[in-house]
Amino acid sequence: MPRYLNVALGQLGPIQRADSRNQVVARLCELMRQAHAVGAQLIVFPELALTTFFPRWYIEDEAEINSYFERSMPNADTQPLFDLSRKLGVGFYLGYAELAQESGGEVRYNTSILVDHSGQIIAKYRKVHLPGHKEHEPWRRFQHLEKRYFTAGDGWGVTQAFGGILGMAICNDRRWAETYRVMGLQGVEMVLIGYNTPVHNAPAPQHDDLSLFHNQLSMQAGAYQNGTWVVGVAKAGVEEGVDSIGGSCIIAPSGEVVARCLTKGDEMAIARCDLDFCAIYKRTTFNFDLHRQPHAYGMIVERKGETLAADGSPL
Ligand code: ING
């Protein structure tokens, strides 16, 4: 009996600074209802899905920064989504800004959770690859201060859920091959990824016209090279004057796009994913145990950056 998992894209259009969490949660609930109506068992929402993408601003007031974070999950604002999840029997992935209480004090993470069909949180992930910069860079049309506002997470686990092995990543993680391979080595069959990606990339504006291509290329490569499904979901459209890409899609282990959103607003799309389809890649071309040669890969972990000798010659 094939292990089918009906997964829905829960793409969000813009969230403006003035939009309340209540208004956003109502939009998320509407998407979940639409997904349930077409038989979804799981819906994937974007990164930082409860507020506007605040790292676009240089904010000095600590209280204002913390106003974008959640101190608990679920909480009064998000409880309706958890209640609906339980009522409809639809699980979800949700990205949000987490203010965690740790032994050394409060720590800020860019977080995602996986919630099962009964509305219970069964996994939490904290973004590893924090793009952008730490200090105010006024030369930019807008800031990208994730290195300032968030602490990097420890890495990627996988979770047995929805009849398969699922993993999570967030936004910039999807551009790095290591993200998928670490989960691939744990047997992942579906990687869930929310993202907020501005069309304009200040340090490299020549990439702007390729932003949708790079989005899809990264996820297709990750899917194929690890024999896993990949589900990528955007927060899209013009938020506080900044245009972000859409391009939400579901990618099969073959690398083929099987479903996508067509707009840059709130939109639900769905695919029936056969988790057993992973095996025709994991047992052949990407049979890691049979084909990988770790003795040749040491540099990938030993070196952080590209390393050359003083005279520019390779080391
Ligand atoms: N956003 C962007 C992303 O990785 C970015 C940042 C855009 C990096 C374009 C490089 C090029 O999709 C987040 N939130 O990571």
Image (cartoon, rainbow, N blue to C red):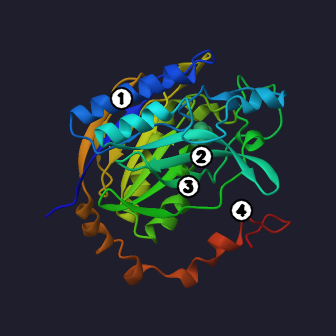
* Residue 261 visible in the displayed image: no
Residue at which label 4 appears:
306
Disc 1 element: helix
Circle nearer the N terminus (3, 4): 3
Relative depth, front residue between 203 and 72 = 72
Q: Is residue 307 visible?
A: yes
**Which amino acid, mark 2?**
Thr
Residue positioned 79% across, 25% down in the render:
139
Measured in 3D between alpha carbons, the distance from the residue under mark 3 to the one under mark 2, in whole angstroms, is: 18 Å
On screen, 226 above or below 75?
below
**Residue type at tag 4:** Glu
In front: label 2 or label 4: 2
Height in image: 206 above or below 172?
Answer: above
Cα separation, mark 3 vs mark 4, equals 15 Å
State the separation of the CA atoms marked 1 and 2. Answer: 21 Å
Task: Identify residue for label 1.
Answer: 31
Q: Are marks 1 and 3 in contact (CB under 8 Å)?
A: no
The label number, if any, that marks residue 45 in the structure image: none
> Identity of the amino acid at label 3?
Trp
Give the secondary structure at mark 3: loop
Rounded to the nearest angstrom, the CA distance separating label 1 from label 3 is: 29 Å
Residue under label 3, please give it.
Answer: 176
